[in-house]
Amino acid sequence: MKLYNTLTKKIEDFNPLNPPFVTYYTCGPTVYDYTHIGHMRTFTNNDLLKRTLTFLGYKVKHVMNITDVGHLTGDDDTGVDKLEKGAKKTGKTVWDLAKFYTEFFFKTTDALNILRPDIIAKATDHIPEMVQLIKKLQEKDFIYETKEAVYFNTAKFKDYGKLSGQKLTDKKIKARADVYLDPEKKNATDFALWFKRVGRFAAHTMHWNSPWGDGFPGWHIECSAMSMKYLGETIDIHAGGVDHIAVHHENEIAQSEGATGKPFVRFWFHNNFLTIAGQKMSKSLGNFFTIEDLNKHRIEPLALRYLFLQSHYRQVLNFTWDSAKAAEEGYNKLKAYVRTLQKQTQRTTLSAEKLKKLEDLRQRFIAAISNDLQTTDAVAITWELVKSSIPSGDKLDLLFEFDQVLGLKLNEVREEKIPEEIAILKKQRDEARKQKNFKKSDEIRKEIETKGFVLDDTETETVIKKA
Ligand code: AMP
Ligand code: ZN
């Protein structure tokens, strides 16, 4: 497989360290607010990579963290802990808040048919591992302590900046009146490994004992500690959003490689943003939609997955309700074809010509996904298959094979059970449409809708489903 590696800024041949096993870590959510569809683009593409590797015969071990402490509102150690802020806003405890939003996160990923990781690691369950790692860095003289925190000294790590390509001096934090900076911090790029429960954090609710006093860990150390605990000191792939390159992942590299002296990650996989009106969809800008908003617009979550498949993960994708609606129509059309094929499914012996066409489509599909996840091509090849003259039984088999990567639940497409009364109305409407009596067909559509069903007119048939 060919995969773009942010570290080398090149598309490279991907080969795991210990084939057929692939060690895969994805940065998970910070559970202080609702998961939105912007996050889902990143998690869907992470899932596509995992499904592709599995499809190609690798055995993937996937670990994802849940950040429930230490992630400040400013990635550069400024601001307040996102969870403490969320708890204050909602009146919940930090623990209840984390539980509530973790559940919402998985409700969303399940709805998008994103496979659950093998190990889900909560930051608050791994404080001893983080303390151990900081101790190791202390032994190697990478850290210093101030009255407020324990910092990683980035000037001591000669490769600092190798992921983002920025030099230490480029990353100056602008002095702003509203931003608090520790006066004892030595370099602007130094980052906190441990915050002490003093000063601005004196009332921090989550806190643990450590050799550097009562306090809580920084955000970056959690991913290094948990990745190493479950996957080893050098892993094959580490994934996240492009916003993590410059600070979070740069810092993960510094502290991990500082501690072990070994390469931390072989391939860095970064997803580009889902934007809205050209701006990153984000919790802090408040310009986000959740799966509940999709429900309100009567767009099913898997239609969003279909939308994501139609852009490359390294490109920005701008979200509009029109594009979501178009994706829903495309997805419904695909499902309508599956329903039609299921009704036919005759098995004939394939002619040499059709067998060749089938194999050609399979090989082109594999080539597309193995080429740095060219999902747009993979979807186009899927449509080519659907419209080909290959007999329906064989066509369905290959379609379901493709769907192991696409994850559109095509093998769960069924004719919905429709009450007799609605079925009669639909028949009457089909008749009215045939006679081009659109006024009558519209009236019947409205009547069907008031009874809790919706109609979707595709090229081949009218699909009816529960609203
Ligand atoms: P957070 O909970 O903010 O740490 O984000 C979890 C993951 O979602 C990270 O990998 C982010 O990079 C990613 N993410 C956040 N917003 C977006 C967006 N608008 N588009 C794509 N990925 C995003
Ligand atoms: Zn992370």
Image (cartoon, rainbow, N blue to C red):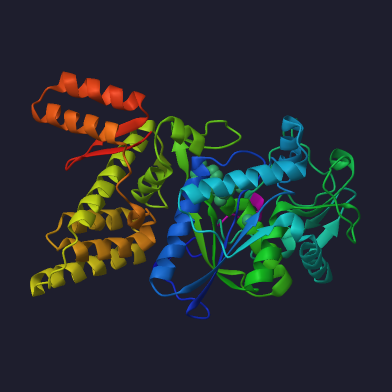
| Residue 240 can be seen in this image | yes
* Res. 48 image quadrant: bottom left
Residue found at x 50% / y 42%: 38
Q: Is residue 363 magenta?
A: no
Quadrant into which the N terminus falls: bottom left
Residue found at x 38% / y 72%: 56
| Residue 81 can be seen in this image | no
Quadrant into which the C terminus falls: top left
Residue found at x 16% / y 32%: 430
Task: Tell me where the magenta segment starts and ends, as one range.
Answer: 165-169
Label total for image: 0
Residue 154 at what x, y percent from top left? 72, 59
Q: State the predominant SS element of the stretch in magenta.
A: loop
Q: For this view, does 290 lie left or right of residue 199?
A: left
Residue found at x 32% / y 50%: 414
Q: For this view, does 41 lie left or right of residue 419?
A: right
Q: For this view, does 461 lie left or right of residue 284?
A: left
Q: Nearer the viewer, residue 153 or 326?
A: 326
Q: Residue 202, relative to residue 176: is it above or below?
A: below
